[in-house]
Amino acid sequence: MFSNKANEWMKGLLSSEEIIRSMNIELDGRFGDDFLTRRLYIDCAKMRVNVELFEMLRKIKSYVLVVLATDNMDCFLHTFDKARSRKRRPTPQSETLSDWAIILDDIICSSEVAALKAEDPERFFGPWLAEHGFTFADAALIDDRADNCTAFAAHGGRAVQYKMGVGDVHDVFEALTGWVDSETVAPTRSSMTESESRA
């Protein structure tokens, strides 16, 4: 399944329901027809995030917009939107997407824009940036993949590669504070971050 279908799913060409149906899983009578879809949404909400990175992003929110930019499926977008609508504030024990979604200002998801970050940065980021009066030069991307960072930088953005468990989040903070002078720049810039989540 995780070949062409994965890309089609992430680009919104296939829905989560279509993917589930294509697996031809037969459930016994104890489960309803929508059991796997409901289970998928529940598991998305329980995805663990990089708390240290999210804490850092919360600190810089007074200077920039923080937007989750992710190559991901419709189920992830649905879960994110639902979590943000509940407006639940993260506590010191919070570790999941449903807990931390509220601190983000928006989301750009590949399944909604029908493009992947490295494949077509203009189509992925461009509409959101234009809608909010920005260009790539006004935006920074934190991402764990080198190809995404290279593509973003090639369009004039500031890219910071960071992989959970490998890099140091303090290096990310220093890179961003070098990009935004917190004493003189108003909160009109945009910081994009990849989903640092683990199912």
Image: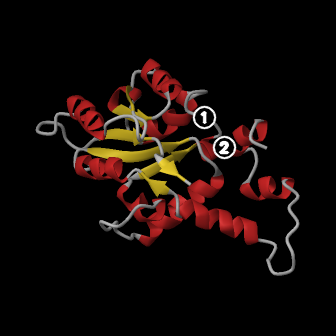
- The residue singled out by tag 1 in the image is 116
Percent from the top left, x then y, of residue 5? 77, 41
- The amino acid beneath tag 2 is Met
Which quarter shows the C terminus? bottom right
- The amino acid beneath tag 1 is Leu
Percent from the top left, x then y, of residue 172? 30, 35
Which quarter shows the N terminus? top right
Q: Is residue 26 positioned above or below 73 on the image?
A: below
Q: Residue at x 81, y 73 (%)?
A: 33
Percent from the top left, x then y, of residue 40? 66, 62
Which residue sits furthest top?
A: 154
Q: Is residue 163 positioned above or below 96 on the image?
A: above
Q: How many marks?
A: 2
Q: Residue at x 67, y 67 (%)?
A: 39
When asked about the image quadrant of residue 84, the answer is bottom left
Question: Between 147 and 81, which is closer to the camera in this rendering?
Answer: 147
Q: Residue at x 53, y 28 (%)?
A: 122
Colouring of the image: secondary structure
Q: Is residue 7 positioned above or below 155 on the image?
A: below
Dot 1, crowdedness within 10 Å: few (<14), some or many (≥20)? many
Are discs 1 and 2 less than 8 Å apart at CB? yes
Q: Is residue 9 positioned above or below 41 on the image?
A: above
Secondary element under disc 2, as helix, strand or loop, is: helix
- The residue singled out by tag 2 in the image is 10
Q: Earlier in the sequence, mark 1 or mark 2?
A: 2
Estimate the spatial distance between the alpha carbons at disc 1 and disc 2, rounded to whole Å.
8 Å
Secondary element under disc 1, as helix, strand or loop, is: loop
Dot 2, crowdedness within 10 Å: few (<14), some or many (≥20)? many
Q: Residue at x 55, y 35 (%)?
A: 124
Percent from the top left, x then y, of residue 22? 85, 53
